[in-house]
Image: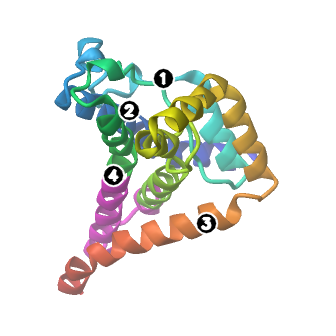
Amino acid sequence: MTTQEIIQTITVYAIPVLFAISLHEAAHGYVARYFGDSTAADLGRVSINPFRHIDLFGTVLMPLGLALMSLPAIGFAKPVPVQYSRLRNPKKQMAYVALAGPAANFLMGLAWALFGIVLLKSGVPGSIFIDIAKAGVGVNAAMCVFNLIPIPPLDGGRVLTGVLPMPLAVKFAQIERYSLFVFIGLIVLMQLHLLDGFLLAGIGIVQKLFFLILSPLTFLLN
């Protein structure tokens, strides 16, 4: 990949990645506050300001590196602190807190799809904005699906922890202490294309849902 192509990739993906990751984390904090834990809110983490959430490796280097390798540009931010003991019903509500992140990505992906459709139908010149909208759709669909993989510290793992019987939930949650190794393992599996079936199928389904939901608008704009 040439220097110009690298710069173009960074330009296209920077805004979608920053906001996909930041709003994902803010959503966790917002739902935790709703259920009784204001820890994230007290620390200013229930915010759309990306600089409150950026992690150099997870927010910048990892998604950029994956994008340059033509892999889904997924990443992570500084984890939002949640004290589950402060939730009114910790075991049940931790699943809702975990689901808030992928749900935020789904809604953002839907918003980027809407933005792209409006640009295309309005005939606004400038393909860079269309490329950014496509990146927003792809990044958020990828993050939604990736984070639902059922292993801690990913949100899918926390959801599974919330529904398992307590003895199993306690043991399963202990995987989270090896978070760095889990991420490294997942990146290796992606590089070896061993997660392609799950990720690509899931991303495809989510993107189809975006455009299915927006199909009435598309029909009206034709």
Residue mark closest to the camera, 4 vs 1: 1
Task: Find the distance from the CA under tag 2 to the CA under tag 4.
Answer: 13 Å
Query: Residue extending furthest top?
Result: 43
Which amino acid is tagged 2? Glu
**Residue 76 in sight:** no
Secondary structure of the residue carrying numbered label 3: helix
Amino acid residing under circle 1? Lys
Q: Position of residue 119 (x, y in %)?
A: 31, 67
Mark 4 crowd level (few <14, some 14–19, many ≥20, 10 Å Cα): many
User: Residue drawn 56% across and 36% down?
Assistant: 152
Distance between mark 3 and mark 4 Cα atoms: 19 Å
Q: Which residue is most to the right?
A: 192
**Magenta span covers which residues?**
106-132
Which one is earlier in the sequence, the residue at label 3 or at label 4? Answer: 4
Q: Which mark is residue 108?
A: 4
The residue identified by callout 3 is 200
Question: Relative to 44, is 156 on the left or the right?
Answer: right
Residue position for label 2: 25
